[in-house]
Image (cartoon, rainbow, N blue to C red):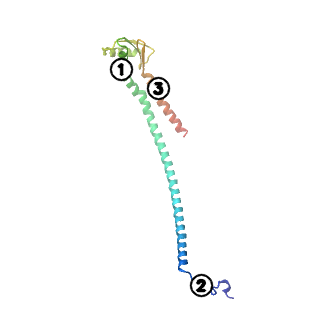
Amino acid sequence: MTVKHLLEDFGDLEAEQLVITDQALEEQRLEAFERGYQAGWDDASKAHANEQSHIGSELARNLQDLSFTLHEAQATILRNLDPLLRGLAETVLPSAARHAFQDRLVEEMSNLAREVGGSTLVLSVSPDQAEKVAQLVAQEPNLNVSVQPDETLGSGQAFLRAGQRERMIDLDTALNEITQMISAYFDTVTEDQKHG
């Protein structure tokens, strides 16, 4: 048995069917080139898209890592600042306020004395400040001030009157508010860190 029946016979084709013109050959080449070019372009586009997707996911992961690291750094800084700021509010600020209190008194007394002319100023301060303030007032010859102790006032408070005009100096309340704001801030930060 022969295998001839399994193979195609090309012997009957006419010679004109095998002739390809130069123009047809050029068209086939251009078409093959276009298909190859398009396939190459599609492969390059797909590779570029895959690379961009990979870069995007890497960037997202790196940003997430960076964000987490930044969050950790902020938490560490805040943990270290907490005792420092509370210490400042409890020790340094009161000391600075005591020194600033006398300067603030002189400034307010001078301003009020200019506003009311030659009237006597009445200055009420806490009993523990009365002697110091009296010495301070004695150093200001242009001011006519009567110093009166008042047990309702704290050491950083003073009440100044001249006629109908009054001024209140209250460094104690300001210091207390600063201390409370610092505590409230760090308490809030601590709670936020606990709950993410």
Q: Secondary structure at mark 1?
A: helix
Give the residue type at disc 2: Glu
Q: Residue at x 53, y 59 (%)?
A: 49
Q: Residue at x 39, y 24 (%)?
A: 97
Q: Residues within 10 Å of mark 2 (few under 14, many from 20)?
A: few
The residue at which mark 3 appears reads as 177
Total tally of numbered discs in the picture = 3
Rendered location of residue 38, percent (x, y): 54, 67
Distance between the alpha carbons at the discs numbered 1 and 3 = 23 Å
In the shown orientation, is residue 8 left or right of residue 125?
Answer: right
Residue 16 circle label: 2
Q: Quadrant of the C terminus?
A: top right
In the shown orientation, is residue 41 left or right of residue 2?
Answer: left
Residue nearer the viewer, 55 or 99 = 55
Residue 15, picture quadrant: bottom right
Instruction: Tell which circle, 1 or 2, labels the residue nearer the N-terminal end.
Output: 2
Camera sees residue 194: yes
Nearest to viewer (mark 1 / mark 2): 2
Residue nearer the viewer, 124 or 168 = 168
Image: 176 above or below 37: above
